[in-house]
């Protein structure tokens, strides 16, 4: 029988783990995972107010919500690298020819506008609003198919000409997913799998619920009432990705070190600044990431939430630091985003 030797942890690694453990304790949720990649080494801490699930928390897949948008825009960049589209293609060129667009502004929307939330489209289609107001704790996306999405686009008058203003839009990214599927001649989930997930080795990332016990269970704001898996319907490109914390760290590491991946060009491209809003104290946006100034260079990040879970991913290219965090509670009181952001900024400042 082989004797296992104890693994020695250096003082700095132990100190980092202790620090992450303290930060994870600040996140109020049934299940919490907070992970850091730093200089090519990972430190992952789990916690939460609920009993430990049968599957270890760090092995579960979590709903990423709007963080999914970064995967969709990376897919767009990958398809552009293959020559299947350009980011300045008009959206209408990648939709059914039978779709009539009566509003001239709709016909001027380019794929780049959808990625950068400058299309002029509202956050969600108007026909989703009544359900959201009457049943704010229930998802109306599940019953929303692609045909209905395209009808909604045809009847929606953009609020302003494309490229003029920034307005966050799930509607726009959902349409981007439909356009990419048409350009790539495959359904969006299959396309994302073959062009992004498989090349990056993200085997713990999917777009749908897995077998029983494979996925984390989300909870309402009270942290006690469980929720069923979120079905995003035709809005999959805007919020349907599920991933394990280790896959999230792999995803961040690919952005930190693009040259060592099959998607080197697209990974670099999605990090290029596209616009700035809010004046001197505002923020910059790349093709898909939010960008804030930090010591030594900017940090890039994105957060997401579904009706029962939250997620955060951010990285600091100058220092090679990345932070991924997930929690199974839908509430601002959860504090996942500020805790993860503050940790990323502090580590970036120390490692600059």
Image: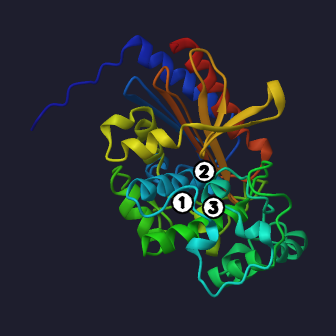
- Residue found at the far left of this picture: 1
Point out residue 73 in the picture as x, y percentages from the top left corner.
Answer: 54, 54
Q: CA distance from mark 1 to mark 2?
A: 8 Å
Q: Circle 2: is it few (<14), some (14-19), or many (20+) Cα within 10 Å? A: many
Coloring scheme of the render? rainbow
- Marks 3 and 1 in Cβ contact (< 8 Å): no
- Tell me the distance, in whole angstroms, between the alpha carbons under discs 3 and 1: 9 Å
In the rendering, at what x and y percent does residue 107 appear? 71, 70
Q: Quadrant of residue 125?
A: bottom right
Few, some or many C-alpha atoms within 10 Å of disc 1 (few <14, some 14-19, many ≥20)?
many
Structural distance between the alpha carbons of marks 2 and 3:
8 Å
According to the picture, the residue beneath numbered tag 2 turns out to be: 67
Vertically, is 276 above or below 97?
Answer: above
Locate residue 110: give its quadrant. Answer: bottom right
The answer to which of 9 and 323 lies nearer the viewer is: 323
Of the residues tagged 3 and 1, which is closer to the observer?
Answer: 3
Which structural element holds mark 3?
A: helix
Badge 1 vs badge 2, beta-carbon distance below 8 Å: yes
User: Is residue 61 visible from the viewing direction of this image?
Assistant: no
Q: Which of 22 and 319 lies nearest the eye of the viewer? A: 319
**Residue at x 73% of width, y 53% of height:** 223
The residue at 79%/79% (across/down) is 102
92 to the left or right of 5: right
| Callout 2: SS | helix
Residue occupying image coordinates x 86% and y 61%:
159
On the rendered structure, is 254 left or right of 287? left
Query: Could you tell whether 101 is left or right of 89 in the image?
Result: right
Q: Nearer the viewer, residue 94 or 72?
A: 94
Residue 79 percent coordinates (x, y): 43, 59
Residue on which the image places disc 3: 238
Q: Which residue is mark 1?
A: 241
């Amino acid at each position: 029988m082989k004797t296992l030797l104890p693994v020695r942890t250096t003082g700095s690694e132990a100190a980092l783990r202790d620090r992450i453990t303290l930060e994870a304790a600040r996140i109020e949720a049934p299940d919490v995972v907070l992970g850091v990649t730093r200089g090519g080494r990972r430190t992952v801490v789990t916690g939460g107010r609920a009993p430990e699930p049968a599957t270890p928390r760090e092995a579960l897949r979590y709903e990423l919500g709007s963080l999914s948008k970064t995967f969709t825009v990376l897919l767009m960049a990958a398809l552009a690298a293959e020559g299947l589209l350009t980011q300045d293609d008009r959206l209408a060129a990648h939709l059914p020819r039978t779709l009539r667009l009566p509003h001239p502004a709709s016909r001027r929307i380019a794929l780049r506008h959808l990625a950068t939330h400058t299309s002029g489209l509202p956050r969600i289609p108007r026909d989703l609003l009544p359900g959201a107001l009457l049943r704010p704790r229930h998802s109306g996306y599940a019953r929303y198919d692609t045909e209905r999405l395209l009808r909604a686009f045809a009847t929606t008058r953009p609020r302003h000409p494309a490229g003029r203003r920034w307005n966050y839009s799930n509607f726009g990214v959902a349409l981007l997913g439909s356009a990419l599927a048409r350009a790539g001649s495959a359904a969006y989930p299959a396309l994302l799998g073959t062009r992004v997930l498989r090349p990056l080795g993200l085997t713990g990332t999917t777009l749908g619920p897995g077998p029983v016990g494979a996925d984390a269970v989300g909870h309402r704001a009270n942290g006690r009432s469980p929720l069923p898996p979120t079905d995003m319907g035709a809005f999959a490109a805007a919020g349907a990705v599920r991933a394990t914390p280790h896959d999230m760290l792999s995803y961040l590491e690919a952005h930190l070190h693009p040259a060592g991946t099959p998607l080197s060009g697209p990974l670099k491209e999605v990090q290029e600044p596209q616009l700035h809003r809010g004046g001197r104290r505002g923020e910059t946006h790349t093709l898909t990431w939010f960008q804030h100034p930090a010591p030594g260079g900017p940090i890039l990040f994105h957060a997401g939430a579904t009706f029962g879970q939250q997620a955060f991913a951010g990285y600091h290219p100058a220092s090679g630091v990345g932070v991924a965090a997930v929690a199974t509670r839908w509430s601002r009181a959860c504090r996942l985003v500020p805790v993860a952001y503050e940790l990323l900024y502090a580590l970036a400042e120390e490692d600059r």
